[in-house]
Image (cartoon, rainbow, N blue to C red):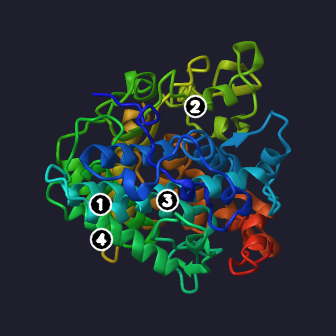
């Protein structure tokens, strides 16, 4: 069964238009197409509609509808910018100004989506409808909120040398809905540790809810996808035992299968394949502009982003992923694109957020890095992905060699999916991989700047990241 996030009434009040800081001009508006959350979310049907409104936030072009994953690869070394937007150029050259419009819009879109989740979470306990499974609805909303806060930390939080380090900085942690002007009082940034604690609390609530299970409804976060999120969070935090255990649960469930190498492109050419745990759904009437931003004007696109020459040459000979990650389709021989997003005219490419290949590589890394390493198990997991890609099995035998091989494998496996910058950041490899832009005087660029509008409008309550 498919559903359209945006075709369902989004039950969001004027409060959802707030970002982390109050915008007075918004308060003076009287929205004509919104309903007050205090009265609109009142039964099982309206709760479901409001939850679909959270998913609609994920679809934004300023979140997974384009920028979140594209910027992570552009800021690293997987993508280039043949286009002309100055704000995108700042991302590519890793010299982001605090008033960068892309950064500001991403931040605001993600906090607006958090506010939708907070609105639902606050409303559910007061609903009397006996047909509503309150814990199940809360589990779904809290799992989605956990995803967003973790995504915020990945760009704007942590430390210059990774995540879950002493003194890591976080983002404002807002857990109640913004429905009135008083609710919009700016909050100072919480520590990274506090934000991650909340992320794990939301995830664990969802995983501990018996009726929150795997669903056949494409596009909705499931218990397995929530497990995958926790495995990813655990890997970032260096909790390798948990990461391995959760990855093993999902791999061993038999629910998901690795797509054969000969039909690897079907993960994206088709939708919701057996390799995917969770995809954000798009349709021609509910579309994104991802392929449009890749394709050249000859093919109906804008030609703003492309595969980098570095990514192109990173593939080993015979790698079945190279024709997917670096193709002339939609571009030219000197302006390579990707087959992961191709529907330029309809804009209905799904965005894959979690797939089985990531769980294998999470487990490979966790096994190599845990206190008592399982190097043989790590190598076995790594080779599942290499052999699927048409490559010979790796013979890496030491922890260091395995980690190097895994990082390389993650780069080409998840190219154009938005992992590269975060992988380099969490493993403290930005300087050694990307060079001068993360030299001693520029290490602060491992964290993106807090939007200038947030720091100014909050009267300094929301502080800027060091170096900007």
- Identify the image quadrant of the C terminus: bottom right
Instruction: State the residue in front, 180 or 339.
Output: 180
Q: Which residue is mark 1?
A: 124
Tell me which numbered mark, 2 or 4, is placed earlier along the sequence: 4
Tell me which numbered mark, 3 or 1, is placed earlier along the sequence: 3
Q: Nearer the viewer, mark 1 or mark 2?
A: 1
Residue 205 lies left or right of residue 74; in this view the side is left
Residue reaching furthest to the top = 298
User: Label 4 crowding class (10 Å Cα cut-off): few <14, some 14-19, many 20+?
Assistant: some
Classify residue 343 by image quadrant.
Answer: top right
Q: Position of residue 154 (x, y in %)?
A: 56, 63
Residue 279 lies left or right of residue 45; in this view the side is right
Mark 2 and mark 4: span between their CA atoms?
Answer: 37 Å
Instruction: State the residue in front, 77 or 39.
Output: 39
- What number is the disc on residue 288? 2
Tell me which numbered mark, 4 or 3, is placed earlier along the sequence: 3
Q: Which residue is mark 4?
A: 241
Residue 374 lies left or right of residue 149; in this view the side is left
């Amino acid at each position: 069964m498919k559903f359209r996030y945006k075709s369902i009434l989004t039950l969001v009040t004027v409060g959802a238009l707030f970002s982390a800081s109050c915008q007075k001009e918004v308060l003076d508006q009287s929205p004509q197409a919104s309903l007050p959350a205090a009265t609109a979310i009142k039964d099982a049907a309206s709760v479901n509609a409001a939850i679909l409104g959270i998913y609609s936030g994920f679809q934004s072009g300023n979140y997974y509808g384009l920028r979140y994953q594209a910027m992570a690869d552009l800021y690293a070394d997987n993508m280039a910018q043949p286009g002309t937007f100055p704000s995108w150029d700042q991302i590519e050259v890793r010299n982001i100004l605090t008033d960068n419009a892309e950064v500001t819009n991403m931040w605001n879109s993600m906090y607006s989506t958090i506010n939708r989740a907070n609105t639902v979470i606050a409303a559910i306990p007061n609903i009397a409808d006996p047909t509503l499974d309150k814990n199940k609805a809360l589990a779904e909303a809290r799992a989605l909120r956990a995803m967003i806060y973790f995504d915020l930390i990945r760009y704007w939080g942590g430390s210059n040398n990774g995540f879950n380090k002493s003194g890591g900085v976080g983002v404002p942690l807002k857990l109640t809905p913004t429905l009135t002007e008083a609710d919009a009082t700016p909050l100072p940034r919480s520590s990274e540790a506090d934000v991650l604690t909340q992320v794990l609390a939301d995830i664990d609530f969802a995983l501990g809810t018996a009726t929150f299970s795997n669903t056949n409804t494409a596009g909705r976060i499931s218990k397995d996808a929530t497990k995958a999120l926790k495995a990813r969070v655990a890997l970032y935090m260096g909790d390798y035992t948990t990461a391995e255990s959760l990855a093993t649960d999902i791999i061993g469930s038999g629910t998901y299968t690795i797509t054969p190498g000969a039909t690897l492109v079907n993960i994206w050419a088709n939708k919701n394949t057996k390799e995917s745990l969770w995809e954000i759904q798009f349709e021609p009437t509910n579309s994104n502009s991802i392929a449009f931003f890749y394709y050249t004007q000859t093919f109906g696109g804008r030609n703003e982003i492309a595969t980098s020459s570095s990514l192109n040459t990173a593939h080993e000979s015979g790698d079945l992923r190279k024709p997917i990650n670096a193709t002339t389709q939609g571009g030219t021989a000197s302006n390579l694109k990707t087959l992961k997003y191709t529907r330029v005219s309809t804009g209905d490419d799904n965005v894959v957020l979690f797939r089985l290949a990531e769980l294998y590589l999470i487990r490979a890394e966790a096994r190599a890095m845990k206190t008592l390493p399982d190097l043989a198990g790590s190598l076995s997991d790594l080779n599942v992905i290499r052999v699927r890609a048409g490559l010979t099995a790796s013979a890496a035998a030491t922890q260091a060699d395995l980690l190097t091989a895994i990082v390389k494998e993650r780069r080409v496996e998840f190219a154009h999916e938005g992992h590269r910058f975060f992988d380099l950041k969490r493993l403290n490899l930005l300087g050694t991989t990307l060079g001068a832009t993360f030299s001693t005087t520029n290490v602060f660029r491992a964290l993106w700047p807090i939007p200038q509008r947030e720091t100014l409008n909050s009267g300094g309550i929301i502080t800027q990241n060091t170096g900007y």
